Image (cartoon, grey):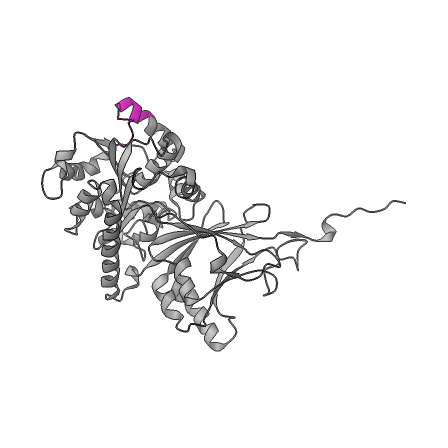
């Protein structure tokens, strides 16, 4: 049995062509293995509908439809926001060892958000609907907050299903998950949405579920941290492939269908792979992605460079978010003319975009151009240093942080080789940074009365 779930601002009818393709017995079809196809349909443009509403409604609809609950009895294809919906549903209503999903194919999923989600409603309408827009001024506000880059929702969901050892949903013997994403933006009027490293709607780096997380302790009097001391945790149980030439819609056979002749075959193979074949399948897609990345570098277009979605959250020693700060990347000590030139290049060419999450500014998304970062540091002795500057500053206020001078705060120092551990193309890295909040003696005092 196969279930197909659409994304935001869409409906089930968009996937009739994909269902028809999959149910055929042709080269890209798996019809002989499919007994039933069920197209999920849900409301995503109502401003009051939340992800909690969607997952609870999906659970009810699953039961009402009488879909199987036996372990690994159903395959699923999800597109865009559908990836978040099914992941959230799995952790809320299923156990890893009894989940009914065997193979999960994610087409251009917005696993760590979309740069389109926080744009104006007029831009969203034009980008998604082109000249045929409708219902442009009710866009699903609560869903878009979850889809916004650096959203607490996507961070918390990753903590629940990617980084919790007790929540091992994915891998051989569990759910065999494949993520496919295009590398090409839209054409025509919809090109207003195109951003480097994206398929027009989602970034390549935010689609991939092979993510990582790390905690940096920059509290007062902490010495320099070396990458070898970091507890870098990675989720690696997913097959991931970048498909050259596909945009956010065509990868799901929407519109005029696939642009890349191999896309249908990738989809077929993802929905046919068995446990014993999964590691080879991962390697195959990894090699193909490396080939695609190498090929696109020859185009000399930043759009196709390898980017990392780096999500930073700054908190104090009480666990409270710090809203006013700068996440700093600089070369060596940033004192010599060469160091300053390198640091300027980092700010101008490596950090492609910084997005501050609207409802909680302690969350930031930085789009890091890994190709340009690697190329800047050509001497083995070079170091990429990482620190933060936060406000309020204790020198001027009675409470706040000491982060403005070299001696105030710790920092992370990376060699050119170590940079490649922390900054990797086509993935998301969650970075929790901790600093110390201080109080002046004047804030509270006891005074004698006799």
Q: Name the spot of residue 394 as percent of width and height, x first.
A: 65, 57
Q: Is residue 282 visible?
A: yes
Q: Is residue 104 above or below residue 315?
A: above
Front position in the image: 365 or 167:
167
Quadrant of the rendering where the N terminus is positioned: top left
Q: Can residue 8 be seen in this view?
A: no
**Is residue 312 within the magenta segment?**
no
Q: Number of labelled discs? A: 0
Residue farthest along the right direction in this orientation: 450
Relative side of 195 to 394, left or right: left
Please say if 45 is above or below 435: above
Q: Which residue lies furthest to the front in this view?
A: 276
State the residue lying farthest toward the left. 26
Instruction: Report the residue that reaches farthest toward the bottom.
Output: 337
Residue 368 percent location from the top left of the image: 39, 59
Determine whether, in the image, residue 99 is placed left or right of residue 338: left
Above or below, 165 relative to 368: above
**Residue 297 is drawn in which quadrant?**
bottom left
Front residue of 126/304: it is: 304
From the viewer's perspective, is residue 55 above or below residue 394?
above
Residue 144: image location, x then y, percent: 38, 42
Near-viewer residue (168 or 119) = 168
Q: Is residue 41 left or right of residue 257?
A: right
What span is colored magenta in the figure?
60-72
Give the quarter of the figure containing the C terminus: top right
Which residue appears at 37% of the width and 66% of the height?
A: 374
Residue under the image location 27 percent in, 64 percent down: 301
- Residue 76, percent across and down? 25, 36
């Amino acid at each position: 049995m196969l279930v197909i779930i659409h994304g935001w601002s869409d409906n089930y009818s968009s996937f009739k062509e994909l269902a028809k393709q999959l149910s055929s017995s042709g080269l890209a079809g798996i019809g002989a293995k499919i007994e039933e196809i069920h197209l999920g349909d849900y409301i995503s443009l109502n401003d009051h509908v939340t992800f909690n509403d969607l997952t609870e409604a999906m659970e009810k609809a699953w039961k009402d439809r009488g879909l199987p609950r036996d372990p690994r009895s159903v395959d699923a294809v999800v597109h865009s926001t559908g990836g978040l919906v099914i992941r959230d549903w799995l952790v809320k209503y299923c156990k890893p060892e009894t989940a009914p999903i065997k193979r999960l194919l994610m087409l251009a999923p917005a696993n760590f958000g979309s740069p389109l989600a926080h744009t104006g409603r007029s831009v969203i309408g034009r980008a998604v609907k082109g000249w045929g827009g409708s219902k442009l001024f009710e866009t699903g506000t609560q869903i878009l907050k979850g889809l916004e880059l650096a959203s607490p929702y996507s961070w918390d969901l990753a903590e629940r299903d990617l980084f919790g050892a007790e929540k091992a949903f994915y891998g051989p013997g569990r759910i065999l998950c494949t993520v496919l994403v295009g590398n090409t933006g839209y054409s025509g009027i919809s090109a207003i949405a195109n951003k480097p490293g994206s398929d027009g709607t989602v970034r390549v780096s935010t689609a991939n579920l092979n993510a990582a997380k790390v905690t940096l302790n920059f509290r007062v009097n902490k010495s320099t941290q070396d990458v070898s001391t970091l507890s870098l945790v990675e989720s690696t149980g997913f097959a991931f492939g970048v498909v050259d030439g596909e945009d956010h819609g065509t990868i799901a056979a929407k519109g005029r269908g696939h642009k890349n002749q191999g896309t249908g075959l990738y989809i077929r193979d993802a929905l046919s792979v068995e446990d014993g074949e999964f590691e080879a399948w991962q390697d195959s897609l990894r090699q193909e992605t490396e080939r695609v990345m190498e090929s696109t570098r020859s185009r000399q277009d930043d759009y196709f460079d390898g980017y990392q979605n780096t999500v930073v959250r700054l908190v104090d020693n009480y666990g409270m978010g710090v809203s006013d700060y700068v996440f700093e990347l600089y070369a060596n000590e940033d004192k010599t003319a060469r160091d300053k030139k390198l640091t300027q290049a980092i700010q101008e060419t490596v950090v492609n975009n910084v997005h501050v999450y609207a409802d909680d500014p302690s969350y930031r998304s930085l789009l890091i151009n890994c190709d340009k970062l690697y190329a800047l540091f050509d001497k083995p002795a070079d170091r990429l240093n990482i620190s933060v500057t936060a406000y309020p500053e204790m020198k001027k206020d009675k409470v706040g942080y000491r982060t403005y001078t070299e001696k105030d705060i710790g920092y992370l120092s990376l060699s050119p080789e170590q940079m490649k551990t922390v900054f990797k193309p086509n993935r998301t890295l969650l970075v929790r940074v901790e600093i110390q909040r201080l109080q002046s003696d004047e804030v509270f005092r006891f005074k004698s009365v006799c």
